[in-house]
């Protein structure tokens, strides 16, 4: 008798610390019409993953445990459903499917609508490509769609050395902006290599004392840490815009922004195949570099979460699903 095919995946039976993550066997998904089945080679780890693991982040959309975390994937199309015309079996793809609904990327296979994927950058491997989708789309959409950054504008990027931040620095520079970043001093030389024009060591100086006349702030820290969003209003010139990524915009912050003649907007990233195609082109042209601090085997997802949760990584942590 034949049995249903299974796959390895990282599951959790309860909400809690990294120790709740475990390697287990799960049924392999099947693509429905307009979907593709992707054999995952690597999965990126993001802050929203550990927040959801604990009960924050997107936990409310994941339902009750057990569930499989993860949204960033890079792999190979194994099967296409009826109606798929943009991809074919054997294509190497990357994407951030389904976000903020569950994508279950910490697994050997995922299924999702074909147009939520794009052909991965040709010049990098799956481990590097898997570091891009959620961070890259967050950086791109916050700069291009939310803030509408233009050449010549002054853009301040908080947490510039992180997974989203180091890509935002490069995208903003590509768009012609004057880029200012906050990061610890040890990461300044690297960020200058990526295109940052000015850098502020947030451990030594209050950034609002060092930066002014900014057109756009990309806030990747939030008010939960030392009132970064609120303090950022002081750096903006009249008519300036702050895009608050991790924690949204509290009513008092929105009121304070309006009183100063500023724009404040919350942000949540969306799946975006065309933008991923654009980003892949920038990577293949050498305009954008992707920093992967470390690659761990799928079975070490708990350790990956511990390290990302510390908030001190340079770039991204990635899981090798084949290891």
Image (cartoon, grey):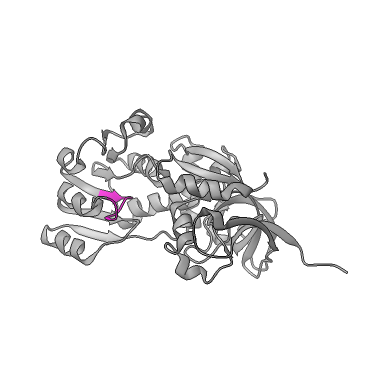
Camera-side residue of 110 and 317: 317
Say which residue appears at 38% left-offset and 54% top-offset.
Answer: 141
Say which residue appears at 29% left-offset and 40% top-offset.
Answer: 182
Q: Residue 26's x, y, as percent? A: 68, 63
Camera-side residue of 65 and 92: 65
Camera-side residue of 68 and 23: 23
- Which picture quadrant has residue 113? bottom right
* Camera sees residue 130: no
246 magenta-colored:
no
Q: Which residues are magenta?
A: 217-225
Camera-side residue of 66 and 40: 66
Vertical placement of residue 80 versus 94, above or below: below
Q: Magenta part mainly helix, strand or loop?
A: loop
Vertical placement of residue 19 versus 189, above or below: below
Vertical placement of residue 281 versus 187, above or below: below
Q: Which quadrant of the rendered structure holds the N terminus?
A: bottom right
Say which residue appears at 47% left-offset and 44% top-offset.
Answer: 307
Q: Residue 208's x, y, as percent? A: 17, 43
């Amino acid at each position: 008798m034949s049995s249903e095919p299974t796959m390895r995946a990282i599951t959790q039976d309860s909400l809690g610390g990294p120790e709740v993550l475990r390697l287990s066997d799960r049924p392999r998904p099947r693509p429905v019409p307009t979907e593709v089945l992707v054999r995952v080679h690597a999965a990126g780890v993001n802050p929203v993953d550990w927040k959801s693991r604990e009960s924050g982040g997107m936990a409310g959309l994941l339902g009750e445990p057990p569930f499989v975390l993860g949204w960033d994937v890079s792999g190979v199309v194994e099967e296409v459903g009826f109606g798929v015309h943009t991809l074919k079996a054997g294509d190497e793809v990357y994407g951030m499917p389904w976000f903020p609904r569950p994508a279950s990327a910490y697994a050997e296979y995922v299924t999702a609508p074909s147009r939520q994927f794009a052909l991965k950058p040709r010049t990098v491997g799956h481990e590097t490509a898997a570091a891009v989708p959620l961070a890259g789309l967050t950086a791109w959409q916050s700069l291009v769609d939310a803030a509408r950054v233009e050449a010549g504008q002054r853009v301040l990027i908080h947490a510039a050395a992180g997974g989203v931040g180091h890509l935002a620095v490069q995208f903003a520079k590509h768009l012609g902006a004057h880029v200012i970043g906050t990061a610890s001093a040890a990461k300044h030389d690297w960020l200058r290599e990526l295109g940052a024009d000015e850098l502020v060591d947030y451990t030594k100086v209050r950034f609002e004392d060092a930066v002014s006349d900014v057109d756009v702030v990309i806030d990747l820290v939030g008010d939960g840490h030392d009132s970064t969003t609120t303090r950022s209003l002081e750096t903006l010139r009249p008519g300036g815009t702050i895009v608050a990524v991790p924690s949204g915009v509290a009513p008092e912050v929105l009121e304070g922004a309006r009183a100063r003649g500023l724009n404040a907007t919350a942000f949540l990233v969306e799946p975006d195949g065309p933008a991923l195609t654009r980003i892949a082109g920038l990577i293949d042209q050498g305009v954008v570099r992707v920093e992967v601090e470390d690659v761990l085997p799928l079975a070490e997802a708990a350790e990956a979460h511990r390290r990302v949760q510390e908030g001190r990584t340079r770039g991204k942590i990635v899981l090798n699903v084949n290891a």
